[in-house]
Image: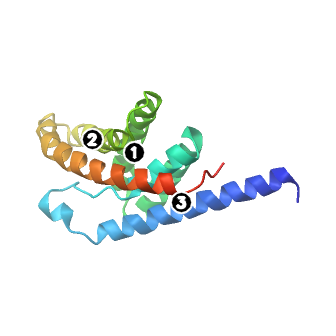
Amino acid sequence: MNKNNTSRTKKIAIYGLLVALAMVLSWVESCFAFAMIMPGMKLGLTNLVVMIALYKLGNKDALIINVVRIFLVSMTFGNMFSLIYSLAGGVLSFIVMIIAKKMKLEMTLVSVLGGIFHNVGQIIVAMIVMNTFHLIYYLLALWISGIVAGVVIGIVSAQIIKRIPDFR
């Protein structure tokens, strides 16, 4: 096996491990009843995987892992609506996280912005689906949960990223 095949195999294995970790974290997250407090509220545990991929693999690889994660988690634990909401939130938050990372913002702030804009993307889709602008008021409550979760996920992911070697 030549070096390119070994490198490709390693990359696929890392993708698989990170996607599997995201799916497990999504399942763990589903065990908590935060949605009973407020629909749409989550811990954002899968953002740990996105942050690790973003900082250890790069933007393109992190995007692939994020999109694959969204599709698999939605098909396993959700439905077509959860796919649409997750994709909107996930892609918007990812774009914002890339911009924040390029601006050299602290990892915790990158995570917080990701949490906030994930909620923004989902609310935009909900406003379109439900044909009402009134859901915009729901954002304040989701932003609070997004900020809290983003801080926790940011701190944890920064510690993990410091401790694991580069995957490249």
- The residue shown at (34%, 51%) is 155
Quickly name the residue at label 3.
Answer: 18
Quickly name the residue at label 1.
Answer: 90
Report the colour scheme.
rainbow
Residue 19 is left or right of residue 75, and the answer is right
Q: Nearer the viewer, residue 162 or 85?
A: 162
Give the alpha-carbon distance from disc 2 to disc 3, as whole Å.
23 Å
13 vs 87: above or below:
below
164 vs 59: above or below:
below
- Where is residue 28? Give x, y as percent: 35, 70
| Amino acid type for the residue under numbered disc 2 | Ile
- The residue shown at (24%, 69%) is 32
Residue 122 sits in which quadrant?
Answer: top left
Q: Nearer the viewer, residue 127 or 105?
A: 105
- Where is residue 154? Give x, y as percent: 35, 49
Q: Residue 116, labelled with which disc?
A: 2
Going from N to C along the chain, the mark reached first, 2 or 3, is 3
| Amino acid type for the residue under numbered disc 1 | Gly
Given contact means CB atoms under 8 Å apart, are the residues at marks 1 and 2 in contact?
Answer: no
Give the alpha-carbon distance from disc 1 to disc 3, as whole Å.
16 Å
Going from N to C along the chain, the mark reached first, 1 or 2, is 1
